[in-house]
Amino acid sequence: MSPLLELDDVHVRLGDSHVLQGVSLAVAATGVTALLGRNGVGKTTTLRAVLGLVPRSGSIRFDGREIGAGRTPWVVRQGIGYVPEDREVFGSLTVAENLRLACPDPAPERAALVDELFPELRERQRQRAGTLSGGQQQMVALGRALLAPHRLLLIDEPTKGLAPRLVTEVAAVLERVAAVTPVLLVEQNLPVVRRLASAAVVLDAGRVVHAGPAADLLADADRTKALLGVGAR
Amino acid sequence: MSTFLLLLATGLGLGALYFLVASGLSLIYGLMGVLNFAHGAFLAAGAYAAWWAATGGLPGAGPDGWGFVLATAFGVAVGAVIGAVVELAVIRPLYRRHIEQVLVTVGIGLVGVALLRGIWGADALPFPRPALATGTTTIAGAAIPNDRFVLIAAAVAVLLGLLAVLRASRVGLILRAGVENRAMVEALGIEVRRTFTLVFAVGGAVAALGGVLGSVYLGSVAPGQGTSLLIFAFIVVVIGGLGSRTGWAVAAVVVGLVQQLANYYAAAGVGDLSVVLLLALVLLARPGGLAGRTA
């Protein structure tokens, strides 16, 4: 099966810093592809480069179409949803307004999925998103991305800063999400990666240093430690 | 008592005029972070366009009745078009470059005034006063000129319209979200740039409406009219609090009343000084303005 998203020799320069130095990777059309690496190696920048949130060069193809020169709204409208690190919900808007902003008229099955995954959001529809807990804000951010008819989701550290119980809940939700929509997932929590990801791409200093099945990488403790600086267990 | 009522009505009318000018200014700053010093030129251009239309330039338009309504609509449309063109041609390439924005909008303001002087001269021209605005209405013994009521009605309509759009429409939702996090709105697939152009057009339209009604109130139109009103509009925005529609409305009323009452009960000219003192006091007590938000 041909990849859904392909990056070829993508560079990002932010000020004097050459953050991405020729990143090439492929994201499968099904399941979860994990984007891994130590802090500051360019994982978030890679997602932002796909979306056009940072100036980039190189080729980015989505479903066979070149999107590397497109502006962010256009790229997103091609079918790529984004759940950013730190959620970035609109704090002054209510939960309902956050969701309506993302998709004013969602398909019934999408709305039903969000309702089913996040029943708490229905109860908090009129609450300002800025007053929600971190876990609840993550639900809004995920719900926002799920309502729109995206064909790929870029999800950046969804378990960051969450309590262990919530991490398990978010992982379960992501498992359901990935069954519907392929995901490129940036994640530091390796048990979550082990549970969700079928493929793994590892970045180091703005370059891809490993790409292959996630299970193979995580089964090799020495290699995992060498690439990620942490143990696989 | 009748004098005091007349002063109150005049102060409220003046406040309404300040609100009309401030609302466009603040809308543009609140969403786009653009401090638009060309806003006074939008106002003056709208007023001159309405004057031109009402004095025979536009078929169907005239100095009274529906003809004047058409002339006003023409002035408002000119303000909207100028706002949109300025955003598309000048502001868009300069987003996030605040110093350049200030310089370019100051430049447009100066050029706009010079252009109006070049075309229609530096002297104030008599502005048509429709019958509705020239009469008076007696309330508790005070004969209050109707133009005050027209200004107040227009300001209330604009305030309610803005609140309705911001709270109940999709554009309003995008605007409120865009004020908070523009990049994230774009990451939801929403083209914020179009909304920015719309905001500039609406800001220009409201400024032009303020220009027309201000000219009716003053009985004349002059090239520098917008610039002097702009100073008070900035004061209203700062006192009201950035981003707060109701804050600007309250501030506009307070500024109009303080200015009017001080001019009458102290001495002519003290009103302007009082407004500046009021600004200083508010900034000392509440740096974020009455609505409590800081820039």
Image (cartoon, rainbow, N blue to C red):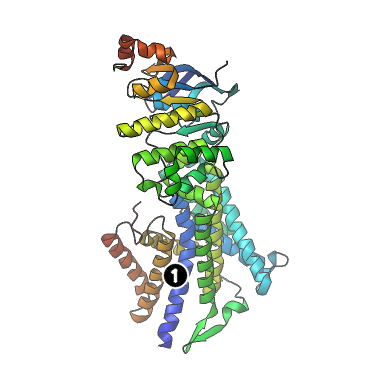
Q: Residue at x 48, y 30 (%)?
A: A177
All told, the count of numbered labels is: 1
Q: Residue furthest left?
A: B284
Task: Please provide percent x and percent y for residue A137.
Answer: 39, 41
Q: Residue furthest bottom?
A: B141
Which is more toward the observer, A135 or B59?
A135
Task: Please provide percent x and percent y for residue A204.
Answer: 36, 17
In this rendering, the answer to whether B163 lies above or below A130 is: below
Which is more toward the observer, A118 or B68?
A118
Q: Toward which corner of the image does residue A23 lie, by quadrant?
A: top left
- Which corner quadrant holds the N terminus of chain B? bottom left
Task: Please provide percent x and percent y for residue A51.
Answer: 49, 30
Q: Secondary structure at mark 1?
A: helix
Q: Does residue A209 appear anywhere in the picture?
A: no
In the image, is B102 to the left or to the right of A100?
Answer: left
Residue under label 1: B15
Task: Please provide percent x and percent y for residue B197.
Answer: 55, 48
In the image, is B89 to the left or to the right of B250?
Answer: right
Which is more toward the observer, A210 or A109?
A109
Q: Does residue A16 appear anywhere in the picture?
A: yes
Chain label for disc 1 = B
